[in-house]
Amino acid sequence: MSLYQNIADVEEKIDKYCNKAGVSRKDINLIAVSKTVGWERVKEAYDDGLRSFGENYVREFVEKSQKLPEDIEWNIIGQLQRNKVKYIMNNKIYLLHSLDKLSLADELQKQCLKHDKYIDVLVQLNLSGEETKSGISQDELDGFLEAIASLDRIKVKGIMTIGPTFGDEAEIRKDFASAKKIFDKLKNSMSDIQYLSMGMTGDFGWAILEGSNMIRVGTAIFGKRDYNKA
Ligand SMILES: *Cc1c(COP(=O)(O)O)cnc(C)c1O
């Protein structure tokens, strides 16, 4: 399948689920997840019209953001180690989706001060309780937000979650529905809350039905990943 055709297929599916959910296509942000994908192919996706990309690994992100056009919105969606924060500071980041630890928040604050920058973030929630997943639990969220409220370089723009890996439709949608509830509550109490990032290749239709406004799609756009290339 060509990249162009894959993107068209993804757009068709987004449209279908937007109709079902009664939301407008323009309310859904599509992030093309380009981890392990070479920059030439990302450029091809850019030439096909995509502007928003998601990366998991710092080295890849830095390389691609230096080689590719400046109007790309780069999202960091994977777990970010504290000692790697300094390497992302020279590149423009649209949104970090995976803030999941106070120690990471402290380092972001410190490096942002040093580089005179601000960073927009989503707090990653782990609703399924799966231990292999990062993210803070629902019970920890209020305390976490309180703890980072004093870090003035970090702007919380919403939440991100990953659906349960082995769940069926009902289980996945249940977690997405919980995330939407949390998101709505935050939106009422915090002025900058804007994004609910949930839904990947296998479940973005259900995510849209449950109120996601930002989906992160890799495989359906770029095909199966080859981790040896990463
Ligand atoms: C890799 C990744 C995706 C994309 O997954 P696909 O199933 O290929 O669409 C989305 N979100 C996160 C956090 C990822 O690590």
Image (tube, grey):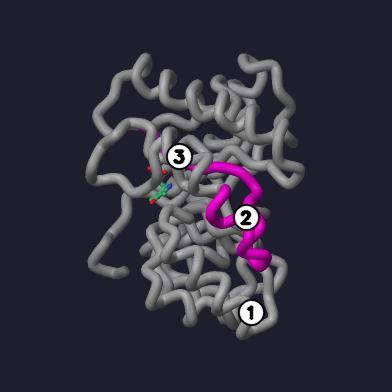
Could you tell which of marks 1 and 2 lies nearer the N-terminus?
Answer: 1
Q: Is mark 3 within 8 Å of ligand 1?
A: no
Q: Is residue 163 left or right of residue 186?
A: left
Q: Is residue 183 left or right of residue 60?
A: right
Residue receiving disc 2: 149
Amino acid type at image mark 3:
Thr
Residue 147 falls inside the magenta stretch: yes
Where is mark 1, residue-wise? 113
Looking at numbered disc 1 in the image, what kind of residue is underneath it?
Leu
Q: Give the left or right position of residue 224, taking residue 101 as reference.
A: left
* Quadrant position of residue 210: top right
Relative to 119, does residue 187 appear above or below in the rendering? above
- Amino acid type of the residue that numbered disc 2 sits on in the rendered structure: Ala
Q: Which label's residue is closer to the chain start, 3 or 1?
A: 1
| Placement of the C terminus among the 4 image quadrants | bottom left
Quadrant for the N terminus, please: top left
Say which element carries label 2.
loop
Q: Position of residue 130 (x, y in %)?
A: 26, 37
Residue 230 in the magenta stretch? The answer is no
Question: Which residue is located at x 56 percent, y 29 percent?
Answer: 182
- Residue labelled with disc 3: 161
211 is higher (above) or lower (below) than 36: above
Residue 48 makes an appearance in the image: no
Instruction: Rate crowding at label 2 as few (under 14), some (14 to 19) or many (20 or more) other CA atoms within 10 Å.
Output: few
Contact (Cβ within 8 Å) of mark 1 with mark 2: no
Residue 190 coordinates in the image, percent (x, y) = 71, 41
Which label lies toward us, 1 or 2? 2
Please, what secondary structure does the residue beneath circle 1 have? helix
Q: Which mark is residue 225?
A: none
Q: Is residue 218 left or right of residue 91?
A: left
Q: Which residues are magenta?
A: 146-163
